[in-house]
Structures are given as C-alpha cells and as structure tokens.
Image (tube, rainbow, N blue to C red):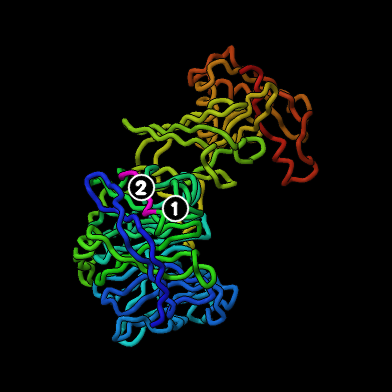
Amino acid sequence: MDRRILSVGLFLCVFCADIQLVAQDLTHVKIDSINSSYDEQNPVVSPNGKKLYFTRSAHPENVGGVVDRGDIWVSTKNEDGSWSSPKHAGDVINHVGLNGVVGFSSSGNTMYLLNYYDKDPSTGRGILRGGLAKSNWNGTSWSDPERLSIRFFSNRSEEISAYITPDETTMILSLRSYQSYGNEDLYVTFSQAGGEWSQPKNLGNVINTPSQEWYPYLADDKKTLYFASNGHAGQGSRDIFVSKRTDGSWSNWSKPVNLGASLNTKGVEMGYFIPNEGDMAYFSTTQNSEGFGDIFNTPLNKEEQAIQAIDLVSTVTETDPKIADAGPPVVAMTMQILDIKTELPVKDAVAIFTYGTDESVVNLANVTNQEKKFVVSFVENTNVTVRIEAEGYLVYQEQFQAKATPLSIDNEFDSVEGFRLTPAKIGTTVQIENILFQRAKSDFSNMSAAYTELDKLVRLMQANPNMEIRLEGHTDNRGDRRLNQKLSEDRVKSVKAYLVDKGIDAARIEAIGFGGSKPIADNSIASSRILNRRVEFVVTKN
C-alpha cells in the first residue's frame, strides 16, 4: 500500500484525574488506498478489525449520484495489514441522502446507521426519515434497516452524527434539538425495555457551545468522550477534543482538551475512532487531502491503549430485550408563546415552569428556531404552573397537567401547547372564545367550555393586579333592536358576575352591551352571522 507519511510532533492527552497535555512525537498516516478526490469522513472499523466503513459524498456511484450527501463505502484489510480499494456498500444500507455507520454490536452482526428510508412495500418507494436505524447480518448480506424508536426524538438540523457503544446500551447523538444551546449539541440516550431508547439528554454546557459539536466517539470506559467542535478554542474551523465524565452523571464533564496543534490544523478534523485492536486511531481531515476530507490514522497513546483493552460485550438478545428500567414515564411537551391578536410567535419572553420543588426557565432569546418552539420535559401527570413575562405584554399565568405529546412517524411533533399573551397596550381588544349563550337568553349554553375560557381571563387579571377591563357584549342584527340591546347587556353582566364570583374586584370591570350595532362579519350569511354574537374585553388600564 502506498502511504504518505506526515511526520509531526503530536500533542495527545494522557489522562490523569485532571486531563493534561503531554508532548509526544507521533506521525499521521494518510491511507491513500482509501482516499480519493471525493469527500471521505466518519471512519468506523468493524469489531473484528477486518472492515473499514466510511462515508463518501458526491461520488457518481452513490445512490443519489454526484449530488448525494454521502453513502457508506467499505474497505477490507489485506493480509499485509493494508486496506483494499473501497467499494460502495450497496443500496440496502444506503439511500438518497446522508448515510453513515454509527457503530456495531460487539459481535459485529448488528450495524447501526444514520437516518432510514421508510419504504412502502407495495410500490418500493419511500421517504427519507431523520433518526437512526439498525441492520442485521444474515450471513451473506445486511438486512433492510429498521428504525430505532427513540423517545421524543427531534432534530432540527440537516446534520446528524452519532456513536453507539458495543454493548448496545448507550448512544451519543449530535442533534439540533429543543434543548440545544445553539446549533448541534451532543446528547446521550440509553436502551430501555422492549427495544425503545430513552429521551435524549443534553450533555450540558461544558461540552456543548452555541456553535457545533459533531461526530462523538465514546470510549469503552464510557467516560472518555472525543468529539469535533468549532465552539471551543482550536487550531482551525473544526478540531477534535476530548473530555471525561467527572462523576456518575452525564452532565458533569472535565473541560474539553484540544488534541493538539499537530493533529488539529487550519482545516476540518472530525470523526475520531479507536478500533478494538491495533495501535492506530482513525479520523478525517481536510488538511493535505486529495479533495475535501480524507481518512488518516494516528498512533494511540498509552491511555488510549488501556481504554482499548476494555471489552464491552453486547447484552442485547432477541429473547431478553430489557436493558434498563425505564423509570417513571416522562413526557416532552412542545410549546410556543404567541401574540393573542396576531397568532405570531413572541420573539422575546421568559417562561418559568414550577412543578413541586423544581423549576425550569425558558428564555426565548436563546431559542434559535424561527417559530420559537421549545420543549420542556416533565414526569407524566405532574401539575405545572407557568408564568410568562414579555415586554409589551401582560403577565401570563396558567396551571396545567403534563400530558404526553403525540409523535408522528417522521419524529416531528403533531401538537403544540400554545400560550397566548395579551398586548399591554391600552385599547387592546380580545374576543373571549367559546362563550356561547342559550337562544335569546343570558345563560351559557355550554357552561364547562365557557368557564374554561373565563378562568383564563381570571388568571390574567390575577397575574396583573393593576389591570382593568371593559367587557363588551354583541349580538347579530336579527330581531328587535331594543331586545338585542337588552340581551347583550344581560349577557355581558353574566360574564362579569362570573369574574366577580371568582374574586376579581367589580370595580376593575366595566360592562357594556352594544346589541347588533358593531358587527364584525356579514349578518346576511348564517355561517358568518354567528361571529357577531360575541363577548370581548378591552384593556382600559394596566
């Protein structure tokens, strides 16, 4: 095999209680038999050391051709230790879009993959879905990938990378999700009973930054984490870093350490991988490459060799899928804060969720998606109080019980819990929804629905003690004008009476009936005439 040797002085980590850098003279080896003028990245070696899988993009043999984001290719180790010319891994485990190997079971008979293709058996056609999948080796070929069920999985980025430990119990994911600090962050998820995976948990702001954290590799000690980032101090656009968990949690980590100026360059380095055997780690870099990214290897240091010796054996079997107790059910509720008048997202607001002795704070200034949607997780059926404050709006307060939010097959949230803020501007008029009356009477036709809506107004006035309102009652224009005027007055008095009965000072509420004199829709059409029969409140003081 023709290899190009780049002699460098490489600073690698030798782990102590606090990770420090020690100078070592090492070499990078560029594997020319694998690399090409195309983009090669994400190297993963099979557990037996005989296959090297990687992602190659824009190659004409890819499923999506030259515009394809990346297919899995594979090289076989020759008897002399060199790597063969790689071959496309086939269209069973590749599809149009980004493909990559996440890792293997310890036996090598199960391969975990990025994304999956949701195929309709009757037509052979399908849709590319975001997420992860697994494929099983049947002795001659890989099976069709099956989607992994990851509780409340959501990725708002076109990019995704991940790593699974050989015992198939722990995955580190790179996602842009609702708990992310900015762009892609690293999350951890654990296998659960029945083959499901737990809700991904953010690794925290020691690891994650407002920039991008990609291509995780969790060593077999399950403490040492390698990853690529452009958010920590580095040599170029994206460097490889290493950190260690400092306790039994997954949120406390040592400060990430750059692997050194001779491994990391002005280019892009990522995809650090330590195989089960051998004395080399693999990674990709754009520096001194033939095209975009190329696959290199670099000698392991003593600490990495010690970690390599750990043997993680899969405990996953078809007859006994239970890995860990799922614990109490947790629901992830997708939420959005809206302007009650425009139904547009409020850009800057602070929401405080209180439940038991715990509290979660969401600042919309830190929510990067355009729709300002975010997720807060609670133990199912927890009673929660939310208080929302935003400049230019009245304070919002509500109590609710945490219930599961349904997920669709493509992992997007089907339903959103919307909190609607009322502008604090004097003269703001808001229609009270679902306030319906019996025909020609001032009694509510659906008391439960009416009380639900009026209770929202009660909470609004309780949260804003200086707020005063004018209740305005309206009818359509059918019938006697004087009777309509009297009916609108009686109906608005019924609403005021309910608010007062709930403890709101009567002096804070003015009540006026306008009969049918202020229509908002065409009275000649039955479907729109109903819109004129309404009760509104107007902010007169805040």
Q: Which of marks 2 and 1 is nearer the N terminus?
A: 1
At 55% from the left and 77% from the top, the residue drawn is 59
The answer to whether 106 appears left or right of 154 in the picture is left
Secondary element type, mark 2: loop
The answer to whether residue 304 is above or below residue 108 is above
Q: Visible in this render: residue 23?
A: yes
Q: Quadrant of the N terminus?
A: bottom left
At 30% from the left and 84% from the top, the residue drawn is 80
Residue 449 placement (x, y as % from top left): 53, 37
Classify mark 2: residues with Cα within 10 Å, few (<14), some (14-19) or many (20+).
many
The reply to whether dot 2 and dot 1 touch (C-beta < 8 Å) is: yes
Q: Which amino acid does label 2 sit on?
A: Pro
Quadrant housing residue 165: bottom left
User: Which residue matches tag 1?
Assistant: 229
Q: Visible in this render: residue 333?
A: no
Secondary element type, mark 1: strand
Whether the magenta-drawn stretch holds residue 257 is answered as yes
User: Which residue matches tag 2?
Assistant: 256
Magenta-colored span: 254-260
Quadrant housing residue 134: bottom left
Whether the magenta-drawn stretch holds residue 148 is answered as no
Q: What's the CA distance linking mark 2 and mark 1?
A: 10 Å
Q: Quadrant of the C terminus?
A: top right
Q: Magenta region, mostly helix, strand or loop?
A: loop
The label number, if any, that marks residue 69 in the structure image = none
Using the image as rendered, state which of residue 82 and residue 313 is in the foreground: 82
Using the image as rendered, state which of residue 217 and residue 181 is in the foreground: 217
